[in-house]
Amino acid sequence: MKYILAVSGGVDSMVLFEVFLKKCGASSIVVAHFNHKLRPSADEDEKFVAECCKKYNVRFEVGHLNIALGEKVSEEKARKARYDFLFKTRKKIEEEFGCAALIFTAHHLDDLVETVTINLTRGTGWRGLAPFSNSAVRPFIMDDDVLLPESKADILTYASRNKIHFRQDPTNFEPDFLRNRIREKFSTMEPQEHYELNQKIKKLYRRQDEIRAEIDCILTKFLEEEKYFEEKVVKREWFFDLDDTVATELLRRILEIEKISLTRPQLADFLLAIRTYQPEKKFNLPGDKLVTMHKNYFKL
């Protein structure tokens, strides 16, 4: 087994690095660093992480965001590029070593609470309580090992006690970002009140994550029965009589299987196209992928 650690150089991921060094040893670890190239200090972060890996003889993989000079990049695009890099790294390591590899990120409980808060303010519904849906493992959130840090305060304490060096991202303090403004609000809470809120959100998250997995299982079974995995044909009739919420979940599941990511508005537009487009009319998916709507079906 190989453990692929997403390490930015910040305190959270450097604590993750330290935990796995002690727990698994350098030979089992692969550090994956993604340089977004979006701020002047990004190259220094990459250099810092590379030097840490060299010091401990840990495999180092690096990826870069390919952007044109002056191009503005959305948080979603940057996130997608980062995870694409992590998944490619996993495939590369599995093929090279002939063993399974898992991706680990340093998301902690405060990250979860902030993300849930952002999602709910944007009206994302029940899925907003279960973010972080890709196949990475987040031990600071999901592992019940009492020795692992769980919150940001725990991580900072762990870093201090173990004399862990890390880089500071200056954008973490810029008020232009919604997450930073939410983080500032939470910082004014009484410690006990903050702890209780974190625990409530963690409980909701775990339950919603279970529900999401159950829904995905039911939808996958339906697609198996309909021979989707053999024929790769999506029948338009599946979506005609279903409630919008159920139809959206089915469409989302099919797109996940095909590794196509759509926003909520794009999903709604695609569902409407499935239900209303005349035969041979085309729908444009992200990446200039055209889907032709036939009378009874379409293919992705």
Image (cartoon, rainbow, N blue to C red):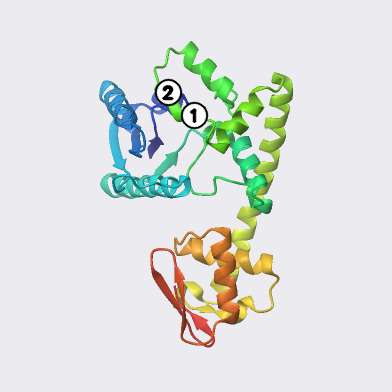
Label 2, secondary structure: give it: loop
Give how far across and how far down residue 9 sits, in percent: 38, 27
**Residue assigned mark 2:** 168
Q: Foreground residue, 147 or 48?
A: 48
Q: From what the image shows, is residue 231 above or below residue 167?
A: below
Give how far across and how far down residue 268 sits, in percent: 59, 66
Label 1, secondary structure: give it: helix
Q: Amino acid at mark 1?
A: Asn
Q: Residue at x 56, y 65 (%)?
A: 267
Q: From what the image shows, is residue 240 above or below residue 206?
A: below
Q: Residue furthest front?
A: 70
Q: Amino acid at mark 2?
A: Gln
**Residue 150 position by quadrant:** top right
Q: Are marks 2 and 1 in contact (CB under 8 Å)?
A: yes
Q: Residue at x 68, y 69 (%)?
A: 244
Query: Few, some or many C-alpha atoms within 10 Å of disc 2 (few <14, some 14-19, many ≥20)?
Result: few
Q: Foreground residue, 268 or 71?
A: 71
In space, the residues marked 2 and 1 are separated at their CA atoms by 8 Å
**Residue assigned mark 1:** 172
Q: Residue at x 59, y 81 (%)?
A: 276
**Residue 22 position by quadrant:** top left
**Quarter of the figure that contains the N terminus:** top left
Give how far across and how far down residue 38 sits, in percent: 36, 38
